[in-house]
Image (spheres, rainbow, N blue to C red):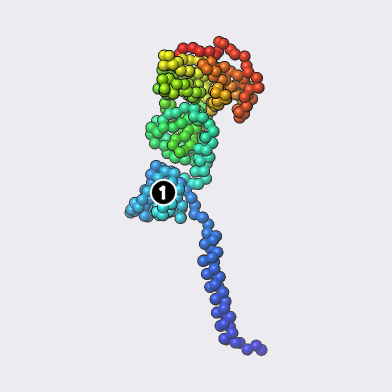
Amino acid sequence: MPIFDRGTAIKKLLLLLLLVALGSTYYYFVYKPAHTLPLESAYVLPASVPVVDTPAEVRIVVGSVKSGERVEIIRRTHNWAHIQTSDGLTGWVENVDLLDSQTYEGGQKLLHDLLDIPVQAEGHTGGVVNLRLEPSRDAAQLAQLSENLKVQVFGRTLVDRPTPDGQPSAAKVRDAWYLIRANARAGWVLGRFVSLDIPEKLSPYAQGTNLVAWVVLKTVDDEGQPVPEYLTADREGTQEADFSHIRVFTWWVKDHKYVTAYVESQLNGYFPIRVAVVDDVPYFRLRLMDEQGQKYQKVYGLFDTITRAVGTVPGWESDAMPAAPEHHHPHRSGRGRG
C-alpha cells in the first residue's frame, strides 16, 4: 500500500500553480496584446458634435469632433458611444451622430467614381438636406448638408415614392434625386432641395426654358479674358428623361455675347453628357434611348463655330468614336444668333 508523501504533493501543487501563473503571464503580456481585436471605427456625421465626460444627465463638455473625423469606439451603450479621437481625446457622443465605417467607405467610393464624370450643373441647397448613400429616403445617411451650400450635379434618377402604411395605394408619385458633390462628400439628395445656379451670361437664354445642364466645350479669348462656350440641355414635356433638347452657345467676340450655334429637340437623353477634345476639336456625346428602349450614344463635334453630328455608338459605356461620319444637316446645325 503506497505511503502518502505530503511533501511531494505540496511540491506538485506548487509546480502546477507556477505553470498556471506563467501561462497567465504569457497570455496577458505576450499573446493578448498581439491578438487584441481592433477597436470599431466610426466617422462623425453632423458638422460639429460635443464630446462629454459621461452619458449621465449631468455631464460636462470636454471637447468636440467635426464632420468626417474618424474616431475609435471603446464601448457602446444603447444610445451612447465611448470614443477616442486621433489626438487622444476620450469621451462620450450619441450613437446617432456617428457613421459606421462601411457606410463611410460607400460614400468615399461614390466620391471617387465622380472623378471620371464631368459636372452637369451647379447649384445650392434650398434648406438643410440629408445626403444619402443611395437615392432612397430609407438609405443610409452620409451627411446633413447645410442650407445654401454650393453643390455640383452629376446625375439624376426617378424613384417611386413609398406609400405610407395603412393608406390605400393611389397613383404612383415619383421623386427626382440628384447625384451631387458638396465639398469632400458625394451622395444622393432629393432634387427639389437643390436650386440650379445658371451662369450669369447664360441666364438671358434660359428664360422660359427648363435648363437642367450646361457643360463647357471650349474657351475663347475676348480681350484677354477666357470665355466658355457651352452645350446646354433642357427638359421639356417629360420627366422620365434627364433632357429632351440641347443648344450650343458660341461666343461672338465682336458683340461680346453668346449666339446659338446649334439646336436639337425631341431627344430622350440621360446624364452624364461627356466632352472630349481630339486634335483641338471638342466632341460631346449624348446618352440617348430610342423608342424600343435601346441605348446608344450620339457624338457631335464643334468645328470652329459649326456643330455637326458625326455618328452614333451602340450602348452607353463605350468611349469609341463613330466608325463613319454622318452627313451634315444644314437645317439642324450652323451658326445663328440667339
Q: Is residue 18 above or below residue 221?
A: below
Residue shown at 41% from the left, 37% from the top:
145
Q: Which quadrant holds the C terminus?
A: top left
Q: Which quadrant holds the N terminus?
A: bottom right
* 2 left or right, relative to 217: right
- Counting other residues with Cα less than 10 Å from the Cα at mark 1, is it few (<14), some (14-19), or many (20 or more)? some
Quadrant hosting residue 9 = bottom right
Residue 70 shows up from this direction: yes
Q: Secondary structure at mark 1?
A: strand
Quadrant hosting residue 301 = top right
x and y percent of residue 273 in the render?
54, 26
Q: Is residue 88 above or below residue 196?
A: below
The amino acid pointed to by label 1 is Glu
Question: In terms of depth relative to the viewer, which is nearer, 80 or 285?
Answer: 285
x and y percent of residue 137 in the render?
48, 36
* 281 left or right, relative to 85: right
In the rendered image, which residue does mark 1 sit on? 94
Residue shown at 53% from the left, 57% from the top:
37
Question: In terms of depth relative to the viewer, which is nearer, 311 or 148?
Answer: 311
Q: In the rendered picture of this protein, how many numbered marks are placed on residues?
A: 1
Residue shown at 38% from the left, 32% from the top:
148
x and y percent of residue 68 in the render?
44, 44
Residue 270 shows up from this direction: no
x and y percent of residue 262 in the render?
52, 15
Q: Is residue 233 above or below residue 336?
A: below
Residue farthest to the top, as pictured: 331
Residue shown at 41% from the left, 16% from the top:
256
Residue farthest to the front, as pictured: 224
